[in-house]
Image: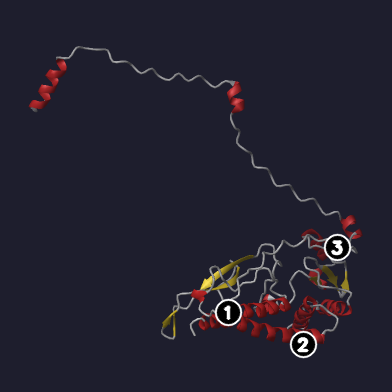
């Protein structure tokens, strides 16, 4: 029994109430699922096994070796973004904070490697009077680069710029293979020499997305897309590990990664992600610099560290002068 008087009073009050039967909540009656319900219930999707690659049709491949795929129609490049436009001003704007909303120095509609278009655009931007010092600095660099390119092009008359850049790289490879340290132990010097001759004679052109296979200085095929099973067949057939085998075109023109330089040309790599990165120097000459500067940036998750070039730092500094 409870020693609390309040409990006793509540018990007495309860005993004085008439007894009533409380309604009992009926249990839900759930019928067992019939066959029709079972059929309508969604089935778990089974993962489809990836189709196994078909084995190489050797006869068809060998018959097709001389086909020049570079002359066939290629997939068109995706359209480039529209040109960024700002209304010109009479008085030059040199303070980033006073520039029009959304202003940035990028030119997304131009190809990075098209120096003449970049130079023309810089001169146009300078006339617009919006951050002209930024474009003056850029123009100065582009003109130096154009001069260097013209010298290299003059040394290889009649060849286009990608071929000239590739020849520069191949020449470095050839010198390496013939060095005292290597002495052509990989037996590729003959291949490299003849690839150089093919480019200079016009027999071979740089065709983005296509490769040619070489063995003992001989070209085995016309330009064609790289396929692993085709490469593996030819490599094994000619005993490439013993006699020297060369795939021309699998690396882009220009300095290779062996020279610690890589340049991602616009649209040259399918999975290259380009984005913008904004940086600023908090204090310059005792003055705060709240505004940032935007740069084009190639996302490379395999990089050990990010490189910020001195030229980019100079651009940041000019804003506070």
Q: Residues within 10 Å of mark 2 (few under 14, many from 20)?
A: few
| Residue 49 placement (x, y as % from top left) | 69, 44
Q: What secondary structure is found at the residue carrying circle 2?
A: helix
| Residue 264 placement (x, y as % from top left) | 67, 71
Task: Examine the rendered structure and indicate whether residue 255 appears above or below residue 45.
Answer: below
The mark found on residue 151 in the picture is 2
The mark found on residue 69 in the picture is 3
Q: Residues within 10 Å of mark 3 (few under 14, many from 20)?
A: some
Report the residue marked by disc 1: 90
Q: Is residue 1 visible?
A: no
Identify the coloring. secondary structure
Real-space Cα separation, disc 1 to disc 2, in angstroms: 38 Å
Q: Is residue 317 visible?
A: yes
At x 88%, y 68%, the residue is: 220
| Residue 142 placement (x, y as % from top left) | 67, 82
Q: Could you say which quadrant of the image residue 6 lies in? A: top left
Real-space Cα separation, disc 3 to disc 2, in angstroms: 32 Å
* Of marks 1 and 3, the one in the foreground: 1
Q: Nearer the viewer, residue 70 or 130?
A: 130
Q: Could you say which quadrant of the image residue 290 lies in? A: bottom left
Left or right: residue 172 compared with residue 214 = left
- Whichever of labels 1 and 2 marks the residue nearer the N terminus, that label is 1
* Of marks 1 and 2, the one in the foreground: 1
- Whichever of labels 3 and 2 marks the residue nearer the N terminus, that label is 3
At x 86%, y 78%, the residue is: 194
Q: What secondary structure is found at the residue carrying circle 1?
A: loop
| Residue 5 placement (x, y as % from top left) | 7, 26
Q: Nearer the viewer, residue 310 or 304?
A: 310
Left or right: residue 123 compared with residue 237 = left
Q: Are marks 3 and 2 in contact (CB under 8 Å)?
A: no
Q: Residue furthest front?
A: 90
């Amino acid at each position: 029994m409870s020693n609390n008087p309040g409990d006793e009073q509540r018990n007495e009050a309860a005993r004085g109430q008439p007894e009533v039967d409380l309604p009992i909540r009926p249990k839900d009656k759930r019928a067992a699922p019939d066959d029709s319900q079972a059929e309508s219930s969604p089935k778990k999707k089974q993962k489809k096994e990836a189709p196994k690659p078909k084995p190489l049709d050797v006869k068809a491949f060998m018959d097709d070796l001389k086909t020049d795929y570079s002359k066939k129609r290629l997939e068109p490049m995706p359209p480039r973004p529209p040109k960024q436009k700002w209304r010109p001003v009479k008085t030059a704007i040199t303070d980033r904070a006073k520039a029009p909303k959304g202003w940035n120095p990028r030119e997304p509609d131009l190809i990075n490697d098209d120096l003449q278009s970049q130079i023309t655009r810089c001169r146009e931007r300078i006339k617009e009077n919006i951050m002209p010092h930024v474009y003056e600095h850029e123009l100065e660099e582009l003109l130096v680069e154009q001069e260097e390119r013209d010298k290299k092009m003059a040394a290889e008359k009649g060849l286009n710029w990608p071929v000239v850049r590739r020849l520069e790289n191949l020449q470095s490879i050839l010198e390496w293979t013939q060095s005292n340290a290597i002495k052509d132990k990989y037996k590729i010097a003959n291949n490299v020499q003849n690839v150089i001759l093919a480019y200079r004679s016009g027999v071979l052109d740089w065709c983005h997305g296509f490769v040619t296979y070489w063995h003992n200085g001989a070209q085995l095929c016309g330009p064609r897309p790289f396929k692993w099973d085709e490469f593996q067949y030819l490599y094994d057939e000619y005993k490439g590990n013993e006699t020297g085998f060369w795939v021309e075109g699998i690396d882009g023109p220009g300095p290779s990664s062996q020279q610690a330089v890589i340049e991602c040309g616009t649209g040259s790599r399918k999975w290259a992600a380009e984005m913008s990165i904004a940086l600023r120097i908090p204090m310059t000459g005792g003055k705060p610099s709240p505004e940032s500067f935007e740069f084009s940036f190639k996302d490379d998750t395999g990089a050990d560290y990010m490189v910020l070039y001195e030229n980019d730092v100079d651009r940041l500094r000019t804003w506070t002068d």
